[in-house]
Amino acid sequence: MSKTDTFELLKKLTAPMGVSGAEGSAAQAAASELDKFGSTEYDAATGNLFFRRKGWQEGRPVVMLDAHIDEIGFIVNYITDDGFLKVSSCGGIDRRMLLAQRVRIYGTKGEGRVLDGFTASVPPHLAKDYSKAAQVEEVLIDTGMSGDEVREYVCLGDRVLVENECTRLLGSRVTSKALDDRAGCAALIMAVAELDGEELGCNVAVTLTSQEEVGERGAKIAAFIVEPDAAIEVDVSFANTPDSDDEECVKMGSGVMIGISPSLSRKLSNDMRTLAQELSIPYTMEVMGRTTGTNADMISISKSGCPTVTLSIPERFMHTPAEVIDTDDIENTAKLIAEYLRRYTS
């Protein structure tokens, strides 16, 4: 795919709301792309999206490609009589960006309505201590409505997002909400698209899974259902910033990050590195001393176990509404996955 196509795909995938446990709209957007290359099934019970590539044959080995479709956000847990909303976090919100943000409340009463609001901020002149980041429990969302008016549209349990639409930056960089992990979803869709019409030696299942940000719950179910012979997990990981530690981060545009961890298959990690070298695909190694903190941890121990590897896309400002990635890294990740599937032998 060209950079234009990659950006347009990201724009389509990041636009829908998909806070953990409410991924339906995001999954449907992804399904509309995957349907071109096989069959999809949306599991309303878990929020997972399952895809089978055309040419599926029973008895052949199955390679599972996984990325999580959910994003961090908030869930409404109280509505005051003055019309303010109180929320809890769904996933690891960066609390430093909580105050004075424009948000959208995805109401579910009746036919559903999206309301605009702002996270209330006490002026520094009146604050007792404004040097510390606010706790989520301290945040109030101002809708400009009374309590009775808000309750006509909003229920307890409705989701809230700090919005940021997908926007081009200089060169091949993009900013948006939900790039963690719609960037991974995009890489998998692009890999499947590249292989369209080719004969492979394996069945390919794509799972875009729910609730990763609240405990990798969807992946545990997905791997149990798919029963893969090998799995590739695509997520984001840390790209460097001026204030970051270069030992823990990589440069944006440096290519796919190939994972090494006690919980991963060393053979798959080595195979990916060898393949990247052979094809001159830029890559770095991401070494983790314990588990990976991704869906790979659940997939690798599903049922009797599954050899699993992580491929990560460098990302800045993770778990904020202004995440930044380089589309070159997405495209190189997709290219490596496609070539691995072309050469796969059980």
Image: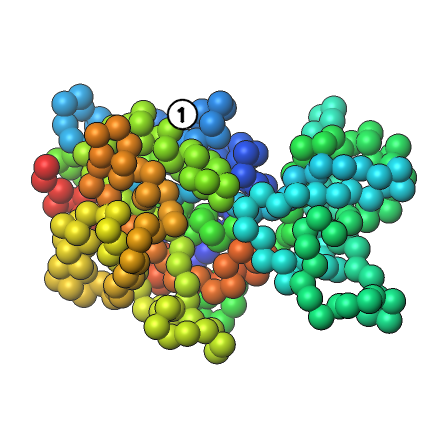
* Above or below, comparing residue 126 to residue 69 in the picture: below
Q: Disc 1 designates what residue?
A: 41
* Above or below, comparing residue 121 to residue 84 in the picture: below
**Residue in the picture at 57% in, 34% down:** 22
Picture coordinates of residue 203, whole percent (x, y)? 20, 32
Does residue 318 appear in the picture of this structure?
Answer: yes
Picture coordinates of residue 110, whole percent (x, y)? 74, 24
**Residue in the picture at 15% in, 64% down:** 277
Q: Quadrant of residue 158?
A: top right
Q: How many marks?
A: 1
* Badge 1 amino acid: Glu
Query: Mark 1 Cα within 10 Å, few/some/many (few <14, many 20+)?
Result: some
Front-lying residue, 101 or 334: 101
Picture coordinates of residue 269, whole percent (x, y)? 19, 53
- Give the structural element (helix, strand or loop) at label 1: strand
* Above or below, comparing residue 207 to residue 285 in the picture: above
Front-lying residue, 323 or 34: 323
Side (left or right) of 94 relative to 239 = right
Front-lying residue, 335 or 130: 130
**Residue in the picture at 35% in, 61% down:** 329
**Residue in the picture at 9% in, 40% down:** 345
Front-lying residue, 334 or 216: 216
Q: Quadrant of residue 261?
A: bottom left
Picture coordinates of residue 321, whole percent (x, y)? 59, 56
Side (left or right) of 158 relative to 250 = right
Q: Quarter holding the C terminus? A: top left
Does residue 63 appear in the picture of this structure?
Answer: no
* The residue positioned farthest toward the bottom in the image shown: 242
Image coloring type: rainbow
